[in-house]
């Protein structure tokens, strides 16, 4: 009897032990899972960038007919990236001087800063002579806008930034991520495929006094539709009347029409009217320095003392964001602008780039008119700059991509810098098919 009881205890003990062991093992596994789980496990997947995502999809395609009209980067007739001749010559000069790689000052390379003001306002402009222009070299147009957004968030607290509808997609991110409230103002009229000037003026009149207005200096992205000189004058009058702060995004000076002075008409007009302005300048397009991230933020103000104080605060903001700007691209830009011979050669190359885009615009319009004469395609050559806003709907864009392997943003924008004469017919067929069947 005692022997039987002893065996039963051993069995119970073993079973309980197994259970305890199982519990212990489960706890160990749970603890291991907890230890292996990232503290960032709840971070959601961000959606792909609407512009850069197009290039990713293009690269993934194996179609021999594929065409990338998404990203705004200039291509030659072989659809290859271009390094300008003046850039190569400027680099040769820089390398021959055996320059060091020391940090730049926070405000950037001084010859570049001078060149930037000369391009924007014209050499010898009173605002430059009087020291009323604060300029800080930054990380191309995007970085310059971001420093400007940080400045607005800190020193114009509560102000709303008004951006055109539509606009370059990153404007919303830049101001939104700095906690700056933004609103749209009407800009594009889909009925005329042109400027909704009446809507623009009504919305800016209704904006609270002291608001900030983002204006595209030339070659509006994505529409390619710019105000006329008379309309620019009316916008300047309204900004004065409502005490609105114009913030110009100048990404295409010289690249839009091939004329640096003509493309700077709007910001120069506003300054000459006595308005204070902010300007983001980029050298990505007009010098082809996409990867060098060359740009600047300029503030043209009422007096030298205000400019000095504002520059000090811009430097403080830049110090926390990226500390110092990159050197090489700034040296290239300064070399080209400040050397009279290279400067004239550069203007010739810009006219060549702008002219090639203008030519393919005309070829595309004529091809579409021949294939689809019942639709007005004149907007293609009325628009200027790198882009054309086609008016294609998202479903039509999907057809362009899925059926024809033409990659573009879903708002219907195409980059004519990525089109050549050999592909005009193919693109026209894809557009006509998408318009008629979707």
Image (spheres, grey):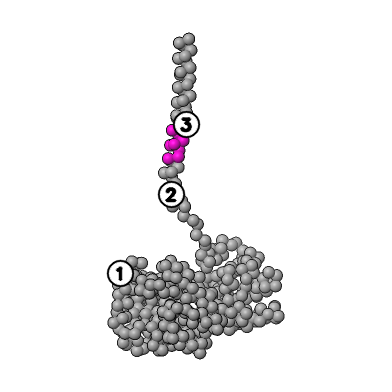
- 374 sits to left or right of 90: right
Which residue carries the number 3 mark? 22
Q: Secondary structure at mark 2?
A: loop
User: Callout 1: few (<14), some (14-19), or many (20+) C-alpha neighbours within 10 Å?
Assistant: few
- 300 sits to left or right of 184: left
Q: Earlier in the sequence, mark 3 or mark 1?
A: 3
Q: In the picture, residue 379 is in which quadrant?
A: bottom right
Q: Secondary structure at mark 1?
A: loop
**Badges 3 and 2: C-beta atoms under 8 Å apart?**
no
Which residue carries the number 1 mark? 103
Residue at image position (64%, 81%) is 377
Q: Earlier in the sequence, mark 2 or mark 1?
A: 2
Which residue carries the number 2 mark? 38
Looking at this view, is 274 or 56 the one in front?
A: 274
Query: Residue 261, percent across and down?
Result: 44, 87
**Badges 2 and 1: C-beta atoms under 8 Å apart?**
no
């Amino acid at each position: 009897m005692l022997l039987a009881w002893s065996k039963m205890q051993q069995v119970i003990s073993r079973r309980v032990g197994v259970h305890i062991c199982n519990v212990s093992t489960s706890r160990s596994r749970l603890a291991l899972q907890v230890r292996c789980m990232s503290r960032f496990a709840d971070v959601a997947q961000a959606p792909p960038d609407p512009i850069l995502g197009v290039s990713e999809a293009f690269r993934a395609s194996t179609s021999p007919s594929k065409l990338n009209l998404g990203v705004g980067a200039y291509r030659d007739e072989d659809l290859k990236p271009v390094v300008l001749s003046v850039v190569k010559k400027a680099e040769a000069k820089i390398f021959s001087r055996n320059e060091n790689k020391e940090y730049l000052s926070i405000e950037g390379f001084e010859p570049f800063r001078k060149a930037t003001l000369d391009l924007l306002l014209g050499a010898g402009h009173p605002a430059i002579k009087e020291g009323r222009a604060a300029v800080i070299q930054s990380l191309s147009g995007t970085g310059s806008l971001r420093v400007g957004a940080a400045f607005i968030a800190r020193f114009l607290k509560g102000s709303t930034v008004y951006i055109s509808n539509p606009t370059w997609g990153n404007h919303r991110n830049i101001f939104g991520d700095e906690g700056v409230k933004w609103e749209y103002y009407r800009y594009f009229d889909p009925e005329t495929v042109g400027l909704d000037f009446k809507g623009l003026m009504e919305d800016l009149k209704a904006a609270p006094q002291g608001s900030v207005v983002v204006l595209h200096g030339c070659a509006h992205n994505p529409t390619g539709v710019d105000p006329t000189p008379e309309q620019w004058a009316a916008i300047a009058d309204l900004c004065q009347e409502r005490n609105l702060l114009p913030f110009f995004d100048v990404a295409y000076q010289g690249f839009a029409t091939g004329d640096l002075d003509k493309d700077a008409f709007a910001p120069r007009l506003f300054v000459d009217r006595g308005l204070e302005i902010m300007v983001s300048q980029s050298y990505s397009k007009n010098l082809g320095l996409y990867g060098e991230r060359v740009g600047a933020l300029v503030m043209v103000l009422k007096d030298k003392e205000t400019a000095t104080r504002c520059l000090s605060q811009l430097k403080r903001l830049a110090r926390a964001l990226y500390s110092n700007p990159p050197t090489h691209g700034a040296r290239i830009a300064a070399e080209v602008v400040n050397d009279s011979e290279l400067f004239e050669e550069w203007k010739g190359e810009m006219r060549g780039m702008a002219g090639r885009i203008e030519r393919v615009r005309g070829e595309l319009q004529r091809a579409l008119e021949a294939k689809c004469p019942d639709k007005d395609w004149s907007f293609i050559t009325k628009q200027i700059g790198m882009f054309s806003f086609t008016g294609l709907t998202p479903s039509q864009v999907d057809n362009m991509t899925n059926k024809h392997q033409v990659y573009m943003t879903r708002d219907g924008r195409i980059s004519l810098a990525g089109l050549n004469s050999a592909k005009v017919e193919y693109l026209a067929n894809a557009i006509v098919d998408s318009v008629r069947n979707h």
